[in-house]
Amino acid sequence: MSTNPQRTLALAAEYYGLLSDLASRGESVSIGDLRSLLQKHHPDGERAPEKVAELLEQFGLFEKAADSDTSWEVPHVIGEFLRHLSMRQRLSAPGLLGPIIEEVALQTEVLRQAFETVDIDRVRLASNSIKQALEAARGLSRGNSKAIMNEVMRIKTREDLRSLQERYLFITYLHEKHLTPLGALVEVGGEMEQRANELIAVAKLGRNSMPDDPFVPELTSKIIAGVRRLKDEAWSDFHASLREVTPLFRQIRRDHRMAVAISRQLDRVGREGTKGLDKVVDLLPIARWRPDNVFSTYALEEYLSGVANYVANPDPGPLATLSDSVAPPVLDPDEVIESLLAAGEQRDLLAWIIGTFGAYPDQQLLQAFHKLSGSPGFQCAFGDQPEQTETETAIYTYFPMKTSANA
Amino acid sequence: MLDHLEKLEDIFRELSRGRHLSAADGDLFAALEKHPDDYQAVFKKLGFELVCDARGFYFFFGARATANNVNRLALFLYILIDWLADNGEGITAALAGKSFNVDQLPHLASERYLGYLQHVGIATPAELAETIRTMENFGFLALGGDGSFRLLPPAHRIVDACVAAGLDTEKTAEEESQC
């Protein structure tokens, strides 16, 4: 492999589309596949596919596939670099940040011992290791955050081409395996904050214990700045990811639950036919009221039975004489109004009318009730609990009307 | 006493014939939104339970007399959602008004779905179209002029029934296994 970084970068720029395409697919290519890709990305290119493969391999942009000498793939490190350039980072394996933070803790102890023994060489060595670990942690945090954003965008735009079930499994994995453990690390009081505080304390201790050393103040300042930067960025990366993932996770989880319930329901219909839908129908009563619903089946039967016994021209019988008839008493509406005004506010208008004018026929009592309830002279309002009142001919169940005279 | 309740008669007529009123119903829904408690109280006196669903729709709980063929409507929606899930589409988004072309529905295009539908007597495009029209009458969807339709918020009620029925079945199975 040639070690000419400038030429490597120039070649990567020339074949960027092809390399990026291959890196995102993560597959190996044969000469035939490479020919197709060159036609797509370099239709006017003059190099033969064999020559292109040789050149890319020479500069480390291709490597032979593990399982074949006649196919190539983009090395992992090049793929990561290309994804970084195109802001299309991939998710790293969950839990990678933990070991890096452990390494920081280990090197913090080494640094503390170096300060205690005033060993500047060990101080510089430990400082370098710590800086590298901090940078690695920062890069991982930022890369993962961008990768999560990419995944969220792919889901939102349906570019992920997953079924709802697959999407649910993926977002659950993202939530439980990446974000939850990351939150435990970076949140206030978490592992990262503890380690960062320890490191800052050791750096301050070193600055005080070796104040005259020409390198220590700068080294410790850089460590403290690096730790604070990591803490801030990791916290903000985590919360940015959480903001993107949480609502999507909740929505997909809700959708998934619905889909599972419906899938089971359809399965039941497949096995049991319409009987499988009985519970759903019970839980989904849709009103379908028509005026004829006011007749209960029983009342309707009685009515129809009456119709069956109808006689067109019944025997009129003997004519009644005037002396036989008793004229029904007539309830004077004005008398009812005057009585109500005298009686004052009533909690149950109908009960009061029946109680006061019970000698009159029900029809007249109800007419009086109707007249009073619509009268502008009174304020009326229905109560909430049904009441029952009895007359000689009927039992009435109704919502009582509270009545008071208008001032 | 009832003067401030606008369109009372129209609202009662629609609700009592099973329609679910949502924002797609314009004035009727707007009137209900102004005084939901008052409408509820008035209808209660008449013996009707007006349900106000927080997802933006109203309906009469059908305790007295209920519509037939509810199983057709339910099965139509369940198949649609099952198909959406298999194709990675969001169900929430679909229930929030995604547009569907009637000609591209999966109901009659798959043996599995046809098998379910034969139990409720749907086997032809005409029968499917009749089910869609019934759903429109009940306010579960809105038909467009171009052979498309979109689901309306009341469709949530049909999904709720499925989820609740599933939970019910699980509970019964659990109780039976404990006995």
Image (cartoon, grey):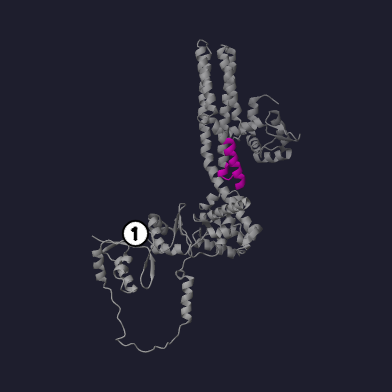
Bin the neighbour count of mark 1 within 10 Å (Cα to Cα): few under 14, some 14-19, many 20 and up: few
Q: Which residue is mark 1?
A: B4
Residue A162 in view: no
Total labels: the figure holds 1
Q: Please determine whether, in this image, residue A389 is positioned above or below residue A192.
A: below
Q: Please determine whether, in this image, residue A291 is positioned above or below residue A149.
A: below
Q: Is residue A166 magenta?
A: yes
Instruction: Pinpoint residue A188: horizontal percent, then vertical percent.
Output: 50, 30
Instruction: Pinpoint residue A316: horizontal percent, then vertical percent.
Output: 39, 88
Check the residue under mark 1 and report the chain it is in: B
The quadrant of the rendering that contains the C terminus of chain A is bottom left
Q: Is residue A180 left or right of residue A327?
A: right
From the viewer's side, name the closer residue of A207 and B102.
Answer: A207
Residue drawn at the location 28% of the way across and 66% of the way down? A375
Residue drawn at the location 44% of the way across and 63% of the way down? B14
Q: Is residue B9 left or right of residue A239?
A: left
The amino acid on which the numbered mark 1 sits, given as a three-letter code, is His
Q: Please determine whether, in this image, residue A79 is positioned above or below residue B48.
A: above
Toward which corner of the image does residue A117 lie, by quadrant? top right
Magenta residues: mostly which secondary structure? helix
From the viewer's side, name the closer residue of A90 and A42.
Answer: A90
Q: Is residue A307 magenta?
A: no
Direction right: furthest residue: A69
From the viewer's side, name the closer residue of A303 and B4.
Answer: A303
Residue drawn at the location 61% of the way across and 27% of the way down? A99
Segment colored magenta: A154-179
Toward which corner of the image does residue A379 lie, by quadrant? bottom left
Instruction: Pinpoint residue A328: horizontal percent, then vertical percent.
Output: 30, 78
Instruction: Pinpoint residue A394: horizontal percent, then vertical percent.
Output: 38, 71
